[in-house]
Amino acid sequence: MKGGSVSVSSKEQEITDLVSHDFIEKHSIHSSRVYGTAIHERGAVNIIASDDIRVEAWVDGLDGKVIE
């Protein structure tokens, strides 16, 4: 993770500001990366809080379309 402590603020945080692509590749399974990428691309990840060891977010799901 990238350092610092962040809580809810007026600046919208992106998950990619807080967790590196390499970290995600190392610590997630392929299906989670596929679904997570689709959800992220929809803009459905809202960071609530983060610090040096965790990221907390509200995450909306997919529409249920097979193509997603």
Image (cartoon, rainbow, N blue to C red):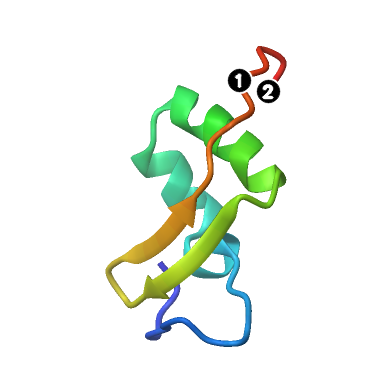
Q: Which residue is located at x 61 percent, y 87 percent?
A: 10
Vertical placement of 19 versus 35: above or below?
below
Front tag of 1 and 2: 1
- Residue 49, by quadrant, is bottom left
Mark 2 nearby-residue class (10 Å; few <14, some 14–19, many ≥20):
few
Q: In the rendered image of this protein, does residue 8 appear above or below residue 13?
A: below
Say which of 37 and 63 sits in front.
63
For the C terminus, which image quadrant? top right
Which three-letter amino acid code belongs to the residue tagged 2?
Glu
Q: Position of residue 30 (x, y in %)?
A: 47, 25
- Dot 2 corresponds to which residue? 68
Q: Are marks 1 and 2 in contact (CB under 8 Å)?
A: yes
Q: Which residue is mark 1?
A: 64
Q: Taking 45 as reference, is 66 left or right?
A: right
Q: Quadrant of residue 14?
A: bottom right
Can you say whether 34 is above or below 19 in the image? above
Residue at 59% x, 31% y: name it: 62
Q: Looking at the picture, how far across and down is residue 15, in whole percent?
A: 54, 61
Going by the numbered disc 1, the residue's amino acid type is Gly
Q: Nearer the viewer, residue 6 or 59?
A: 59
Q: Which mark is residue 22?
A: none
